[in-house]
């Protein structure tokens, strides 16, 4: 597929990148994860819910830095204290007071959690949770839902090279299938260290699945029976379902909660929280990273949490998400399409009926990008506090045009 000329600067940068960076852009940011040649590869600035790419085009953004931006790009309430600290120094040998203040804030805020440790990203947090579960229980096996994403570490990532043996003691089950999970507990009796789950199932590809009735209670029961630990990976849903932890919305009682992404409105920080019972194990485990005690992200997180509490952002994001979802379903129907919106309203994903390979999604998203709206064709979307009714209504106007154009492309 030839590249759209509107992205010439992005393409030129990518061509240069392939000479010095394996793959040019790696991981979930790679061009192949969107629609190659029809999406911008590089962004230069953001304000509120809008981004500007390397070619100067602007977009209403529904990816929000893969969920890390929750208040708006360039939010002064977060950036001002962070930049002020940056000028005084960020990494200062030992942590600053903000590390203590943030841990205290999170322990007060997140239901059922008694301590917190910090890292730089979500993979750090989930991997630490798995390590601590193994050490605390003296067992080796970790269970996770098939298709779930818990980071880029070898134990949980899509890398399946045989030499990477970290996955040998990680087993998967169909999300929401209590009988299959129980069968795994029976098969591996005495060997299970923990179960790791997201609050709802946001698989790597396709529609999102909300937990069936009683699902998390059954996970808790099986863990208690086995003496295993329940890890909640709340990194992606973080603060878009509840300020008190997504587990409070889905009626789960985890032993660990991994957090990150929106915690600091885009500043690099991850967090692992746990119950009092696990505090001694965590204290005896060597937890470190050169940049894990940098002060700027802690101050950004404190400011971000303060703003989220002050403005009741969860209600606003969900209201905007419902407005977007209902509008897309209606606009799709006008074009003759049956559209499905899955996931919580603030973390939605759109699919076309009878489109398992997401070809329609790819064409629709590419058309929307050309119209100045960034909607990912494969990854779930995110709403932020910066999305207001005029932004959503402008999106829906352009979506109505894009649906009609998709219909023409596929001859429907």
Image: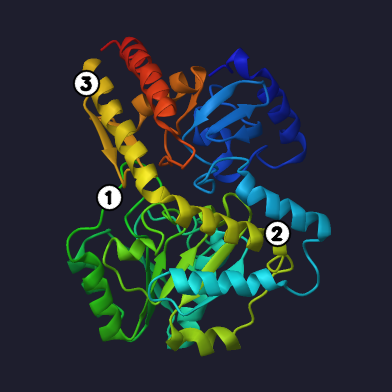
Tell me what residue is drawn at x 47 percent, y 61 percent. 156
Q: Earlier in the sequence, mark 2 or mark 1?
A: 1
Q: Measuring from the top left, give residue 126's x and y in whole percent.
A: 50, 66
Helix, strand or loop at mark 1: loop
- Above or below: residue 141 compared with residue 239: below
Tell me what residue is drawn at x 64 percent, y 71 percent. 99
Q: Nearer the viewer, residue 74 or 409?
A: 74
Which label sits in the foreground, 1 or 3?
3
Q: Quadrant of residue 152?
A: bottom right
Q: Nearer the viewer, residue 136 or 59?
A: 59
Which label sits in the foreground, 3 or 2?
2
**Which class describes the residues within 10 Å of circle 3: few (<14), some (14-19), or many (20+)?**
some
Spatial CA span between label 3 and label 2: 47 Å
Residue 333, numbered circle: 3
* Residue 347 appears in view: no
Tell me what residue is drawn at x 59 percent, y 30 percent. 51
Q: Earlier in the sequence, mark 1 or mark 3?
A: 1
409 to the left or right of 261: left
Which label sits in the foreground, 2 or 1?
2
């Amino acid at each position: 597929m030839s590249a759209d000329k509107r992205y010439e600067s992005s393409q030129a940068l990518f061509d240069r990148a392939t000479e010095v960076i394996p793959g040019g852009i790696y991981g979930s940011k790679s061009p192949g994860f969107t629609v190659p040649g029809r999406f911008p590869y590089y962004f230069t600035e953001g304000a509120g819910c809008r981004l500007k790419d390397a070619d100067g085009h602007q977009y209403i953004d529904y990816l929000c830095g893969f969920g890390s931006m929750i208040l708006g790009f360039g939010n002064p309430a977060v950036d001002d204290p962070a930049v002020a600290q940056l000028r005084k120094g960020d990494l200062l040998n030992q942590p600053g007071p903000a590390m203590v203040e943030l841990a205290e804030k999170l322990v007060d805020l997140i239901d059922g959690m008694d301590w917190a440790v910090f890292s730089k990203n979500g993979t750090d947090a989930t991997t630490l949770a798995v390590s601590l579960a193994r050490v605390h229980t003296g067992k080796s096996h970790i269970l996770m839902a098939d298709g779930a994403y818990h980071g880029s570490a070898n134990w949980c990532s899509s890398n399946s090279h045989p030499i990477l043996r970290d996955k040998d003691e990680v087993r998967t089950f169909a999300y929401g299938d209590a009988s299959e999970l129980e069968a795994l507990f029976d098969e591996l009796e005495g060997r299970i260290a923990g179960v790791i789950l997201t609050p709802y199932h946001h698989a790597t590809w396709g529609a999102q699945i909300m937990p069936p009735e009683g699902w998390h209670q059954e996970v808790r029961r099986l863990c208690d029976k086995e003496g295993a630990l329940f890890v909640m990976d709340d990194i992606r849903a973080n603060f878009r379902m509840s300020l008190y932890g997504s587990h409070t919305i889905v009626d789960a009682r985890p032993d660990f909660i991994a957090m990150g992404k929106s915690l600091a409105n885009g500043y690099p920080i991850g967090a692992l929280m746990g119950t009092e019972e696990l505090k001694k194990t965590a204290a005896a485990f060597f937890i470190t990273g050169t940049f894990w005690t940098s002060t700027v992200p802690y101050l950004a997180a404190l400011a971000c949490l303060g703003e989220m509490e002050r403005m009741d952002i969860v209600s606003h994001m969900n209201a905007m998400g419902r407005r977007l979802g209902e509008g897309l379903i209606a606009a799709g129907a006008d074009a003759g399409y049956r559209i499905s919106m899955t996931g919580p309203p603030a973390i939605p994903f759109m699919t076309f009926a009878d489109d398992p390979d997401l070809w329609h999604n790819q064409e629709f998203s590419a058309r929307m990008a050309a119209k100045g709206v960034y909607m990912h064709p494969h990854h779930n979307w995110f709403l932020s506090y910066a999305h207001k009714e005029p932004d959503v209504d402008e999106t829906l106007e352009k979506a109505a045009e894009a649906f009609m154009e998709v219909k023409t492309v596929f001859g429907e």
